[in-house]
Amino acid sequence: MTKSDREIMEIVEAYDLTGCAYSAGALAGCDPKTVRRYVAVRDAGGNPADRAVRPKLIDRSTFAVAVS
């Protein structure tokens, strides 16, 4: 399930407050693995709210041929 920007901010703030992924997960109401993932992205200089670009199953050229 995708977290909203506000939920992500609350997760990271809970981690900053506690310093522990388990405690932050309990405060934010999520799994400690989720806390670790968002904190790792933030610490690497990324934006935890950015979504990963996933490859498409069908590209435009295949779709154009199938429709024609």
Image (cartoon, helix red, strand yellow):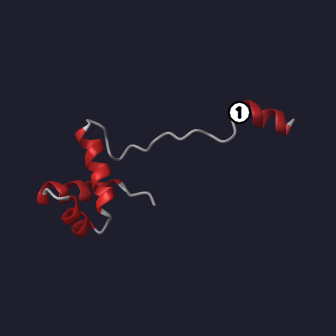
For disc 1, the neighbor class at 10 Å (few under 14, some 14 to 19, many from 20) is: few
Q: Quadrant of residue 15?
A: bottom left
Q: Residue 25 at what x, y percent from top left?
A: 26, 64
User: In this image, 68 relative to 55: left or right?
Assistant: right
User: In this image, 68 relative to 49: left or right?
Assistant: right
Question: What residue appears at the point 30 percent right and 43 percent down from the top-left corner?
Answer: 41
Q: Amino acid at mark 1?
A: Arg
Question: What residue appears at the point 30 percent right and 37 percent down from the top-left corner?
Answer: 46
SS under mark 1: helix
The number of callouts visible is 1
Residue 37 against residue 29 in the figure, above or below: above
Residue tagged 1: 60
Q: Residue 54 at what x, y percent from top left?
A: 53, 41
Q: Residue 39 at what x, y percent from top left?
A: 25, 48
Residue 61 against residue 17 in the figure, above or below: above
Question: What residue appears at the point 76 percent right and 37 percent down from the top-left corner?
Answer: 63
- The reply to whether residue 6 is visible in this rendering is no
Image quadrant where one finds the N terminus = bottom left
Q: Quadrant of residue 27?
A: bottom left
User: In this image, 55 relative to 38: left or right?
Assistant: right
